[in-house]
Amino acid sequence: LTLDLTREDRNMLEGGYDPGVAMAMSIITRMAEVSGAACLIDISAAHIDSALFMGDATLEFAERLVELGAKVRVPTSLNVSGLDEAGWREWPVPEAYAEKALRQMAAYQRMGCTPTWTCAPYQTEFRPQFGQQIAWGESNAIAFVNSVVGARTERYPDLLDICAAITGRVPAIGLHLLENRRGQILLRLEHVPRSMQDSSIFYPVLGTIMGRAAGERVPVVDGLDITPNEDQLKALGAAAASAGGVALYHLVGLTPEAPSLQAVFQGLLPEEEVKINEDLLVTTYRGLSSASGNRLDMVAVGCPHFSLAEFQQLVSIIKGKRRHPDVQFLVTTNRFMVGKAWEAGYLDALHEFGARVSLDACILTSPMLPPEIQVILTNSGKYTYYTPGLLNRQVFLGSLEECVDSAVEGRLVREDSVWNR
Amino acid sequence: MEPMMVGRVVVAGEVRGHVLVSLEPISFWGGYDQATGEIIDRRHPLTGQMAAGKILAIPYTRGSSTTTAVLLESVKEGKSPAAILTSGVDRFLALASIVADEMYARPIPILALEPGDFLKLHSGQVLRITLDGRIFFVDADDHLKD
């Protein structure tokens, strides 16, 4: 198989620009060969996960690109940072880590990336248009932008995302191509009560089922009776991308590339059909909590980063309440969204409730949790999936209402709902 | 000697070592300790096993796009698997190996196997992998002589 390069591609590869461009292009073309791509295509935007400090090698990679004169060619947003630049000293973040995390953050800004520092860039001005070819990193962002926006990105891993932004070129493979965006596996909701579909916990649970059933395939969900809001779709995709390798999903009649079952399968039959009923949903939900008993040390919401609508929803639930002194309440979001929340007057209510807001970072990726925090309650399927292995802490999955009630009571409190009976 | 199987070369390399195999995909981010090479995903069947220096055989990686960075760090730390076998080309792993080559001239050999061949592997077997993708079964005594 041969990769067809344009004259400009070869120019980048063979030293017509700074050596950083040649290094990025070498990685892009080697990956194109590994992937069996026939050619490269243009992208018009990128979202970079690589600015998160993971260790000395990723820092060395970034600083080498800067040293070699690399600059991004397309508008480029940045995913969560290694730490909350303004507030990290309020958490037990080690100094040695902070020094390197800040260097890595600076390197990506020196290459011309915009410091958006969010895992939910689709809720900022960097949200692309339907059909736009882009190169995005961060699994939840990839799932959202492909599925809900209808822009086209493959799953860009760390390090390749910045090479795509520097060259503006990517291998023509996978979800960049229309034929690979068809549905592959059909998930049918059967007699799932509307009250269940209305509850916010439905989305991380359904996402987990989608991820487990689909693996890396494209799942199609048929039979939703309601129109989920964007934050529910965000929770759905984040869970599906964690529990499986889902980078694109379709909801028949709801998402932009799924006007009908026939259209979404592009005239082919589903490879597999899975029925989803109330039992499967409840069993899946119960299996997601790794903690037991009712001890609780912290509530964490904002995975992916909290949106303005989620701030509004939280503020309406916490009005007049105060958290128990033994349970911390953490909201993770970014500098852009907290500015919006401040303008809307939401931050005072959070302060009165006793919530802390951490900016730009993530508890999964910044070493910020004190050791006494051992049991965490969250409304996020993604946190639920990663916390036991990554942070060695135990988790409960619960609704936003349960998160608030539990924080007030100082222990896990379950609602009387179909999920807990 | 006839090779036990032949894989598609994703990143070429010559290596021999014990194989650690699972049919369960893994996310390196949250699943692989880059400083020690231990599999740390508590839900994964290989949890608690050391993959550093071994030939890791997994069908594909899943979850976050941070898998590549974790694998690259493990190369720098000297705690990466000696080689990786997958069922089909896994781009997340290939990238880590290509960047390890660009930066340190230390690529991790990666082969993509036919699904049927993947099922012939058992943890603890000693394998030898050649530059052109042939995989030989080596008995343990022979291995010790090197």
Image (cartoon, coloured by chain):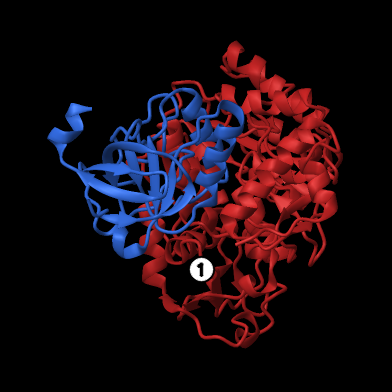
Q: Position of residue A91 (x, y in %)?
A: 60, 19
Q: Nearer the viewer, residue A117 or A294?
A: A117
Q: Nearer the viewer, residue A345 or A223?
A: A223
- Hue of chain B? blue
Q: Quadrant of residue B36?
A: top left
Q: From this view, report whether residue A173 is shown above or below residue A67.
A: below
Q: Name the quarter where the N terminus of chain A is drawn.
A: bottom right
Q: Position of residue A162 (x, y in %)?
A: 72, 40
Q: Position of residue A343 (x, y in %)?
A: 86, 40
Q: Position of residue B77 (x, y in %)?
A: 46, 22
- The residue depicted at 38 percent of the width and 57 percent of the height is B113
- The residue depicted at 20 percent of the width and 33 percent of the height is B143
- The residue depicted at 77 percent of the width and 32 percent of the height is A20
The kind of residue on which mark 1 rests is Met
Q: Nearer the viewer, residue A178 or A194?
A: A178
Q: Is residue A248 left or right of residue A74?
A: left
Q: Quadrant of residue A117?
A: top right
Q: Quadrant of residue A203?
A: bottom right
Regarding residue A117, the answer to whether it shows in the image is: no
Residue at mark 1: A196
Q: Is residue A3 left or right of residue A335?
A: left
Chain in red on the image: A
Q: Is residue A60 left or right of residue A78?
A: left
